[in-house]
Image (cartoon, rainbow, N blue to C red):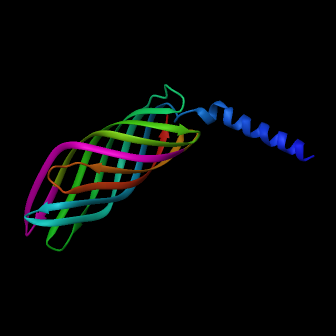
Amino acid sequence: MKLLKKILLTNMLSTLLLSSAAFAGAESGVYLGAGVGNSNIKGPVDEENFDLDTNGYKLILGYNFGIVPLVDLAVEGSYVDMGDESDGVTTFSQSSLNGFGLAGVSFGPVGFFAKLGLSSWSADATARGVKKSVSGTDPVYGIGARLQIMKVSGRIEFEYYDQNNFDDVYMSSISLLYTF
């Protein structure tokens, strides 16, 4: 009886591991999503060091190619609002439009990815009634993990914005995406 249970268990595990679903990458096609997270910006604003630590959000549009099993390749664009914060004297806000290339590996419904791209950003600071705006285009890097069930995926990620005007700019977020 124990041998029969072992054979059945081995067959079920083999079927699960060798099925095409277990080796499939992320769902191929256009995807749309949104996310929320914590954004941090540190650096000089109006000749003072400023430390923004607030909630932000992102809107995501991308395309996953799904060419090779186990490998995810995608292009993605996003709008990110880093949020705004005031320390009583200075009010600061930043937003960006981003373009990424993503590469990752999939282990069934779970995957891990890295992303590399460019960020076109703008920041506004108001101090003592005077508004100052700065903008630029700089590299952005990210890493993350995803869990996909059919056409819906959730992901958690960390993005670092390599901006020349500020010391540290990054966002940690969770997102929900739907593939069409």
At which x and y percent is residue 153? 51, 44
Magenta-colored span: 124-147
Q: Residue at x 77, y 39 (%)?
A: 12
Q: Residue 168, relative to residue 137: is it above or below?
A: below
| Residue at 49% from the left image edge and 46% from the top image edge | 146
Left or right: where 38 falls relative to 156: left
Quadrant of residue 69 within the rendered picture: top right
**Is residue 21 rendered to the left or right of residue 46?**
right
Which residue appears farthest toward the right when viewing the image?
Answer: 1
Q: Position of residue 88 (x, y in %)?
A: 17, 74
Which of the two residues, 35 or 119, is positioned nearer the viewer here? 119
Q: Residue furthest front?
A: 3
Q: In x, y percent, where is residue 176?
A: 47, 48
| 6 in magenta | no
| In this rendering, position of residue 90 left or right of residue 155 | left
- Extreme bottom residue here? 88
Residue 60 locus on image (x, y percent):
38, 43
| Magenta portion: prevailing SS class | strand
Viewer-closest of 53 and 164: 164
Residue 131 falls within the magenta-colored stretch: yes
Q: Identify whether 73 is placed above or below 85.
A: above
Count of number-bearing discs = 0
Vertical side of 178 occupied by 39: above or below: below
To which quarter of the image does residue 170 belong? bottom left
**Which residue is painted at 49% across and 32% down in the image?**
71
